[in-house]
Amino acid sequence: MTDTAKTEAANTDTDQVDEEHRKIGKGLLDENMGPSSAMAHLYRGEIHRMKLWRERLDQTTNWSVIVMAAIITWAFSSPYNPHYILLIGIGTLSVFLVIEARRYRGYEIWRTRVRKLQENVWAIGFDPSSGVDDPDWRERLSQDYRVPTLKISAEEAIAHRLRRVYLLLIGILLVAWFARITAFSLSPWNESAAIGIVPGEIVVTGVVLFYLSAIFVACRPRTWHAKGELRAEDLRE
């Protein structure tokens, strides 16, 4: 076979593959491809698992809000209650943050699959002329079903949950703690902030470093790998 013939054969194969990709969603929404189709059942199952993991995330957030409200209420219920209970609350919310970040990484597995099906199957089912953005999506999805993998790092998961929920919650506790050692104390702040033999200056420095670290993790520039996040302003309208 000459080089020209090989080139023509390769181009023909490429055209056939492109044509197959364009027809992926053809007939998907017809009556004979309705709820009884394997694809519909697969998609329904992935949606169900994504929903379960979403509910697990919401449970952790609910626990955090309840704990925060209880600690603030107790800390201000009596002038004799120690201020460091609010710092314990911050530590408790940090534990919830780590737990929620782990659940978010699990949730991202199922959401990535759902978004891949929506982008490359259902979207084309509605409009086959739009084409496929990722020609290798079926191979990627097949490999993910064979060997499920985490899609985002632990730091990115923590950053997501900080930006969504926990920066606000620990910020409220910070304001409450600051008010507790200043407006609700007759002693100077460096004395009222002390914990046992630990001077108030060291306690305040530790708190400031913790919050600066949290803000850095949440806001530092990075390449986001989470699928389907509405971060662009034009997508929020």
Image (spheres, rainbow, N blue to C red):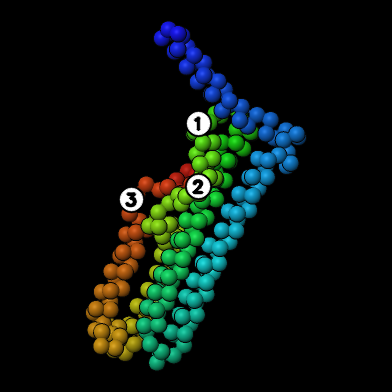
- Confirm or deny contact between disc 3 and disc 2 (CB under 8 A): no
Residue 136, relative to residue 167: is it above or below? above
Q: Nearer the viewer, residue 232 or 99?
A: 99
Frontmost of labels 1 and 2 is 2
What residue do we see at 55% from left, 20% from top?
Answer: 16
Q: Which residue is mark 2?
A: 147
Mark found first going from the N terminus, 3 or 1: 1
Question: Can you see residue 191?
Answer: no
In the rendered image, which quarter is residue 31 located in? top right
Q: Which residue is mark 3?
A: 221
Q: Which residue is mark 1?
A: 135
Question: Can you see residue 114?
Answer: yes
Task: Estimate how packed mark 1 is, as few (under 14), some (14 to 19) or many (20 or more) residues with alpha carbons within 10 Å.
Answer: some
Amino acid at dot 2: Val
Residue 168: image location, x then y, percent: 43, 66
| Helix, strand or loop under label 1 | loop
Residue 150: image location, x then y, percent: 46, 52
